[in-house]
Image: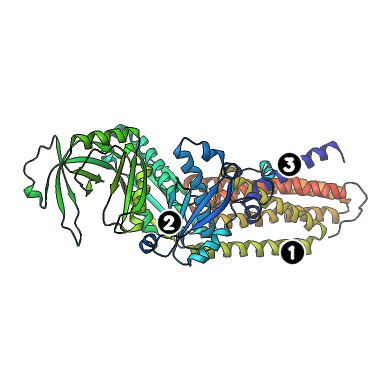
Amino acid sequence: MNSKHSLKITVVLAVFLLSLLYTLPSTTWWSNVFGTLTPEEQNAIPIASFEYLEASQTEADAATGSILKVRANVASELFNRAKNPAKIEDVLNKVADEIRRTLVESKLDVRVVNTDYTDFVITINAANITPDNLKEAVKKTRLYASMPLAITSFFPNKKITLGLDLKGGIDLVYQVDLQSVQDSDNIADAVQRSVEIIRNRIDMYGIAEPSIKAQDNNRIRIQLPGVKDPEGVKQLIQNTAMLQFHIVNYQSTTVDTLGTFDPQSELVLMQPGNAKQTALWYRLNKKPDVTGSDLKYAKVSFDELGRPIVNLEFNSDGAAKFARVTGANLGKQLAIVLDNKVHSAPVIQSRITGGMAQITGNFTFEEAQNLAIVLRAGALPASLIALESRVVGPTLGQKSIDAGVIAGIVGILLVTAYMIFVYKSLGHYANLALVLNTLIVFASLVFFGGTMTMPGIAGLILSLGMAVDANVIIFERIIEEYKSGKTVRASIASGFDRALSCIIDSNITTLLVVAILYAFTAGPIRGFATTLGIGLIANIYTAVVVTKLLLELRYNSGKIKTLNI
């Protein structure tokens, strides 16, 4: 073996190992052995055990389906020393997200409806399973590693992302209402803040692996896999959640009897009615005394009659404002206004110094939970206009995965069998190059953060077919040279030389078309172009470098005098 071969072997082995390192974390085997939480999260949230709590009768009656409360017994200095509630919320959300994701992958219709960051309790709602079976399903979730985590330090913390056509979910496109942006010169900032707030809401809702991106000048595209309640999620996203507290100057059942008001200092808003209560109109101080920006936390609870309510806790500034406004307005009503609608207007009985408040109304449990989520995430800086909405059913997604996997396996088996049958020993080397080609495509998707879609699978299979085509061209040229009377070693060298220009020309020509597809399309077509383009580049490398290296190592020693074809 000469130094030239040594360098080639080193490069090929490096490419193989890197591709393997990037591909393995996306396999089911990896999750089963090393857990679905990242090593950093496992170290930060070392859960000794899960404790299962019975839901109250009120919670069970308010929810649809089974309710299970899971307490994480956390033995972590992070929680013991944490001074930042947002950090505690973030790490506990990771546990909740992974529990939900693994349950959804087990075909369960579940959602995380609440996370109590004080007691570390995660409340799970499932529609198609009994409480006992839900408990068993949670016990089977593999959040933590069964092998030393130190091994994972050699692997990148990335996985292949599956598209909606493979996982099922909803695809939404919104446009930021420019007229509702207070500062028309700062539209880009409003769009970016909307993206961040929507992401916070989705994270609190418990949807794993969301894709939320700003597009063009004022559009936001949201892709949410595994969603079983599209309408509920749409309400969660579109709710502006502008929370304000106003002192009431006058209340009436009709707007005509409110009397005259000063539009410079007053505001007229309505409290919607229902079957038990007529609508009410309020004349309010225009300037709010306390706003949602002063909110520290919001969570769902129940009143003495078992009706869902939302408890609010303000930060130190908000608590001081709340104490000041309630102390200065004893006997008056304080209207709780959400998105320009009055939810309630209780009479101030005494000065409230604890920084606590309640929002009452005719909520269902889910409505109260969604309200608490949007209040915790913050108000949107502008209204959102729905432009597109597409739902991909999980059954369609699973069928797509099954069809793609079957097509890929059958195609690869047929190709490998054909190469071995026609080209004998040469076919084995081509198949080894084909395996490396596939690994390179998957590893590249992980490295560049690409998404695997059904068209992407088609592009991968097509690229594998073209890889076989390149090897067929090479082998036919080698056979021609060998039959002309040349030695095995000379036939291999001459065959590769004759095939090289043809392989380069065909792949480069196709790459130009792929580049146009990628540049001027989006969505599924771009996914097809991505995997096909990566596959073509891998084809050139594996056919021209890897296959040639394997044949040279096998036949260049001169010990093998004949070519088995």
Query: Nearer the observer, disc 2 or disc 1?
Result: 2
* Distance between mark 1 and mark 3 Cα atoms: 28 Å
Q: Amino acid at mark 3?
A: Ala
Q: Which residue is mark 1?
A: 417
**CB-based contact (under 8 Å), mark 1 and mark 3:** no
Residue displayed at 66% across by 63% down = 409
Q: Which residue is mark 2?
A: 170
Whichever of labels 2 and 3 marks the residue nearer the N terminus, that label is 3
Q: Where, quadrant-wise, is the C terminus in this rendering?
A: bottom right
Q: Which mark is residue 291?
A: none
* Distance between mark 2 and mark 3 Cα atoms: 40 Å
Q: State the image quarter where residue 142 is shown.
A: bottom right
| Count of marks placed on residues | 3
Q: Where, quadrant-wise, is the N terminus in this rendering?
A: top right
Q: Mark 1 falls on what kind of element?
A: helix
Residue sitting nearer the eye, 253 or 184: 253
Residue sitting nearer the eye, 79 or 521: 79
In the rendered view, does 352 fall on the left or right side of 540?
Answer: left
Residue sitting nearer the eye, 18 or 75: 75
Q: Amino acid at mark 2?
A: Ile
Residue 536 in sight: no
Residue 171 lies, in percent from the top left, at 42, 54
Query: Nearer the observer, disc 2 or disc 3?
Result: 2
Residue sitting nearer the eye, 525 or 107: 107
Q: Which mark is residue 14?
A: 3
Residue 165 lies, in percent from the top left, at 50, 58
In the rendered view, does 485 fall on the left or right side of 255?
Answer: right
